Image (cartoon, helix red, strand yellow):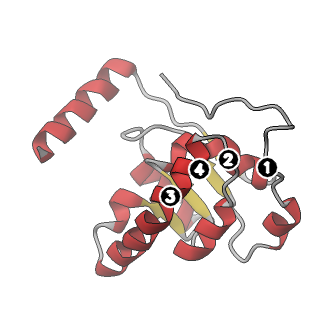
Amino acid sequence: TVTYPQKRSMAQQEVIDHEHANRAKWPLKVISAGHIRCGTFSLAEALDKLGFGPVFHFVRNWQTTEGQKVNNKALDWLFPHLDKADRGEAVDWNEFCELVGCHSVLDSPIYNYWQQMFEQNPSAKVIVSVRDFDSWYDNVVNVYHSVI
């Protein structure tokens, strides 16, 4: 199942500065709303080649020393901000993109917040990757069991 951010009334929402999104140094071009193990690694490679990069993808970043540094910065930013997002508070996703230097975001935990990102970047493209559930589940179990 897909988990979406809690619906809020306009009175409950913090105002997002859409002008900031339009002026952002790193405006989002592509947002992936697809779950892990649904081709996000290949999609990241394709987006880079098609000119939608740099792309933020956790797993791909772990493969290089520079990518690991980016992931560490991302994690330091994400933990307090994801708590805010989960409580229904506004998060400036363009700040995240500027910090890690990306125009496209994919993979976990990013896909859980695609709606908030799209609200701040309405010109971004949203890609939803899907996969047969049984094959997806078997793949996720195999990958995580091999790590544990």
Q: Is residue 1 above or below residue 95?
A: above
Q: Earlier in the sequence, mark 2 or mark 4?
A: 4
Please report contact status of discs 3 and 4: CB closer than 8 Å, yes or no: yes
- In this figure, which residue is indicated by the disc labeled 2? 89
The amino acid sitting under disc 3 is Pro
Crowding at dot 4, Cα within 10 Å, few <14 / some 14-19 / many 20+, comes out as few
Q: Which mark is residue 80?
A: 3
Q: Which mark is residue 101?
A: none
Please report contact status of discs 1 and 4: CB closer than 8 Å, yes or no: no
Q: CA distance from mark 1 to mark 3?
A: 17 Å
Q: Secondary structure at mark 1?
A: loop
Q: CA distance from mark 1 to mark 2?
A: 7 Å
Image check: 5 left or right of 118?
A: left
- In this figure, which residue is indicated by the disc labeled 1? 14
Q: Earlier in the sequence, mark 1 or mark 2?
A: 1
**Which residue: 39% across, 68% down?**
71
- In this figure, which residue is indicated by the disc labeled 4? 84
Please report contact status of discs 2 and 4: CB closer than 8 Å, yes or no: yes
Q: Is residue 70 above or below residue 29?
A: below
Residue 35, horizontal then vertical, whole percent? 45, 37
Q: Earlier in the sequence, mark 2 or mark 3?
A: 3
User: Is residue 32 something one can see in this rendering?
Assistant: no
